[in-house]
Image (tube, rainbow, N blue to C red):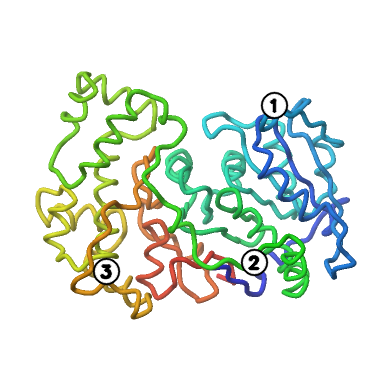
């Protein structure tokens, strides 16, 4: 669910320097970027809809590297501006990055850092968050991206507090969104922040989309594998593991199924995902337990057995390390936040599969060190961002499915 409140005091206090103007939006495009994500800010900020009551922005489309820029379907784009035009923008949008495994051009990262230092608002849509993270703009901040890539973002940039359940995260002067259509949600939020609900509503009607979507990314989570492993022979072994999490097996079992020695399997698995196979397996079991706690009335001991843990003690230890709570406390907090009619009854069958993804980081909870320091905490409900993929918000009285938005320290 979108949640809007007053802009963060520290963001409001930032002044644009030099030639930068608040109404100018620069969109930074790269070769290989998907055309849908690229077109979202162009449509929202680049079309004059003043007749519908939408204040006009000035759009600057900038090439983040040498052109022509090739995009989805083999199309070639020629941007009218280069990186130098970013110096005039009050908002800089990075729609998407071509590959989560490739480093962005250093010249573009320098331009983003300079823009932020000069007071510009920086926005990353979908995998654009990887570009912002590479520039260091997400260090110590909350952020989101497509749920499939959230573990990779968390692993590669451990100082970023990644939350894969949010549609977008507004941290004042740096904003990020989930995949594809969530970019529309964030762009509408920006218009709402700049010009109010009426303008955002008018724009939403023109785009034929809801002005605010309820819920987060949780409903879209599935057991898919990320692109970097989906075509690899190990994908079959990983898929088998996800289907048999209720059984007790170890990494040696997976290595044998891959016809590899344990050492070779470990090395191959790490090269593909950036994570040790044992840590990945534990994470998937915890995610399975999380789902069963949410959707069934199994006891904690029964949940441990159905998730392949050798004992309830093992489940409790791993669950607390990854989600910052005991299984029983997590279930109680989750149900306290759900409508009465949505809670499972005694006869309800549990969900067969967890909301598990192939994690390329050690956990999907994204902040393994524990709760975010007090200076980083903020939500409109005066709750804090914690560990556990945003789930500790539920334990602290915050609806974990509301996008986070800074509203003061």
Outermost residue to the bottom: 340
For residue 38, the mark is none
Place of residue 332 in the rendered image (x, y in percent of width and height, measured from the top left):
27, 73
- Distance from disc 3 to disc 1, alpha carbons, whole Å, reads 48 Å
What residue sits right under mark 1 in the picture?
74
- When asked about the image quadrant of residue 331, the answer is bottom left
Place of residue 39 in the rendered image (x, y in percent of width and height, measured from the top left):
73, 45
Kindly indicate whether the residue at mark 2 contacts the one at mark 3 (C-beta within 8 angstroms): no
Indicate the secondary structure of the residue bearing disc 3.
helix
What residue sits right under mark 2 in the picture?
210
Q: Which residue is at a point 88% across and 51% down the rendered structure image? A: 19
Q: Is residue 151 above or below residue 397?
A: above
For residue 331, the mark is 3
Is the residue marked by circle 3 packed among few (<14), some (14-19), or many (20+) residues within 10 Å? many
Indicate the secondary structure of the residue bearing disc 2.
loop
Of the image marks 3 and 2, the number of the one nearer the N terminus: 2
Indicate the secondary structure of the residue bearing disc 1.
helix
Q: Is residue 59 above or below residue 374?
A: above
- Distance from disc 2 to disc 1, alpha carbons, whole Å, reads 31 Å
- When asked about the image quadrant of residue 127, the answer is top right
Q: Which residue is at a point 33% across and 70% down the rendered structure image? A: 334
- Counting the numbered discs, the total is 3
- When asked about the image quadrant of residue 263, the answer is top left
């Amino acid at each position: 669910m979108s949640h809007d409140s007053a802009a963060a005091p520290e963001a409001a206090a930032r002044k644009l320097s030099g030639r930068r103007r608040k109404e100018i939006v620069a969109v930074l495009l790269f070769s290989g970027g998907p055309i849908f994500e690229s077109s979202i800010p162009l449509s929202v900020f680049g079309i004059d809809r003043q007749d519908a009551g939408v204040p006009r922005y000035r759009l600057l489309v900038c090439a983040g590297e040498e052109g022509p820029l090739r995009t989805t379907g083999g199309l070639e784009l020629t941007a009218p501006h280069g990186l130098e035009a970013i110096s005039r923008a009050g908002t800089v949008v990075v729609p998407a990055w071509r590959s989560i495994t490739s480093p962005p051009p250093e010249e573009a990262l320098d331009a983003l850092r300079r823009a932020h230092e000069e007071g510009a608002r920086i926005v990353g849509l979908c995998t654009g968050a990887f570009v912002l993270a590479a520039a260091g703009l997400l260090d110590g901040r909350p952020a989101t991206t497509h749920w499939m890539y959230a573990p990779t973002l968390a692993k590669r940039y451990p100082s970023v507090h990644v939350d894969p359940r949010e549609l977008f995260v507004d941290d004042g002067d740096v904003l990020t969104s989930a995949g594809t259509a969530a970019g529309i949600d964030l762009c509408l939020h920006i218009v709402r922040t700049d010009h109010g609900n009426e303008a955002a509503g008018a724009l939403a009607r023109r785009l034929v989309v809801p002005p605010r979507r309820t819920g987060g990314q949780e409903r879209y989570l599935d057991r898919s594998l990320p692109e970097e492993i989906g075509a690899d022979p190990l994908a079959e072994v990983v898929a088998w593991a996800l289907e048999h999490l209720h059984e007790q097996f170890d990494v040696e079992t997976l290595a044998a199924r891959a016809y590899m020695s344990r050492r070779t399997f470990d090395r191959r698995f790490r090269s593909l995902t950036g994570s040790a196979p044992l840590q990945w397996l534990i994470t998937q079991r915890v995610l399975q337990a999380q789902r069963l706690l949410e959707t069934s009335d199994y006891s904690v001991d029964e949940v441990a057995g159905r998730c392949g843990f050798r004992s309830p003690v093992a489940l409790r230890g791993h669950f607390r390390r990854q989600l910052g709570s005991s299984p029983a406390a997590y279930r109680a907090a989750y149900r306290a936040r759900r409508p009465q009619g949505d809670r499972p009854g005694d006869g309800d069958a549990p969900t067969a599969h967890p909301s598990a993804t192939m994690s390329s980081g050690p956990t999907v909870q994204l902040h393994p060190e524990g709760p975010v320091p007090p200076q980083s905490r903020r939500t409109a409900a005066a709750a804090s961002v914690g560990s556990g993929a945003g789930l500790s918000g539920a334990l602290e009285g915050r609806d974990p499915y509301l996008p986070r938005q800074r509203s003061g320290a």
